[in-house]
Image (cartoon, grey):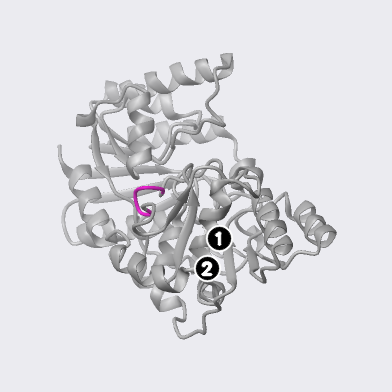
Amino acid sequence: MKILILHNQLWSQYKSFIYQGIYDKIKDSNDELMVLQSSICEKSRFDIKEFKQEEFPYTYPYKLLNYDYLENSNQFITTLKWLKYIIKFRPNVINLTGYQEMGTLPVLFLSKLMNIKTIMTNESVYSKVLHEGSLVYYFKYIYKRFVFFLTDGFFSYGIKSNDFLFRHGVGKKKILLFLNSFDKTKFSQNNSFDLEQSNKTIVFVGRLSPEKNIDSLISLFRFFKSDHLDYKLFLVGDGPLKDKLQNDILKYDLNIEITGSVLWNELSNYYKKSICLILPSVNETWGMVANEAIQMGISVICSSSCGCANDLVIDNYSGLVVDNFDFAKEDFSYSKILNFLENNKFVNKKFLKNNALVFDSERLIIDSLYHLSDN
């Protein structure tokens, strides 16, 4: 059995541990694994000048096709490298980790000719903001339905990811796996749990970009200020909205601190200081930081647009799901969040008990390998 994975970024914390787990389980057998990495990472995620390939902390077999940012890589050349390697390696199964790359259709066509099984990993979720009835959306919709028709099976990361596939004509039988998780063991080893929690601190972790809807947190803290509530917010991350957000914080004199990017093994300094994590995104494929927060023992408030909403974070059972973060002070959403925060010490213990599993990463690896090997 030969397994080929086509992935776009080498520096991917959550995908790497899955690939490593699959490799660890087959390395002493006759099975082979190869991961073709199209680039090192996105521009916003990593400083390429600090990257040393020999210090990459994983041992699964891979080939780096472009020693550059994802945005700088030539998709046409990458596609040719994909096709050339498929013909040379002759895998039994190919895992495509998305559908947006230029090479997706050529790979699917070649796979049909060579009788190679194809499994696509889907993290996309349906978003009303991004899926409006425009002509561009219609053509994208037709393209995705055709791509999904040619694909033999899918790894779907959650209920909302399933819904996205159903909306594009994918039948239930083609969805082989719908589970999302992260490397809990490594996260626990790299982060301190022995920190003092504040009852008035909230944390956001992610890119400071439009889809994260961070402006709504500016509005939320303006309401807190007018109600004389002394909550503090850490915005952990960097991105194109950093300067605008900093100006708004100074303009309205808000108790919000932008920390900039933080190393993975330093996130506990913010999680464990906080009463909860908040994710107001209008478009979020999952929100793996929710897994991290729950693992660190704090609860999660997220928008209904997050992939983890009503899956990992179930409203009023294992967290708080808010339909609308673009609220006015009088809205139900504001009172719902405020009530949650004011009573957090009573509900957080119940939420964490209900969400004790945080999705099992070992099961994710085993199930992935089973379907990749099932021919």
Q: Residues within 10 Å of mark 2 (few under 14, many from 20)?
A: few
Relative horizontal placement of residue 343, taking residue 167 as reference (left or right): right
User: Which residue carries the number 1 mark?
Assistant: 338
Q: Which residue is mark 2?
A: 342
- Which of the 4 image quarters holds residue 107? top left
Placement of 267 over or under 86, stated as above or below: below
Q: Are marks 1 and 2 in contact (CB under 8 Å)?
A: yes
Residue numbers of the magenta segment: 309-313
Image location (x, y in percent) of residue 236: 62, 64
- The residues bearing labels 1 and 2 have C-alpha atoms spaced at a distance of 6 Å
Q: Quadrant of the N terminus?
A: top left
Determine whether the residue tagged by mark 2 lies in a helix, strand or loop: helix
Bin the neighbour count of mark 1 within 10 Å (Cα to Cα): few under 14, some 14-19, many 20 and up: some
Q: Amino acid at mark 1?
A: Leu
The location of residue 213, given as percent across then percent down, is 62, 46
Q: Which mark is residue 74?
A: none
Q: At numbered mark 1, what does the secondary structure look like: helix, strand or loop? A: helix
Measured from the top left, where is residue 346 in percent x and y? Answer: 41, 72
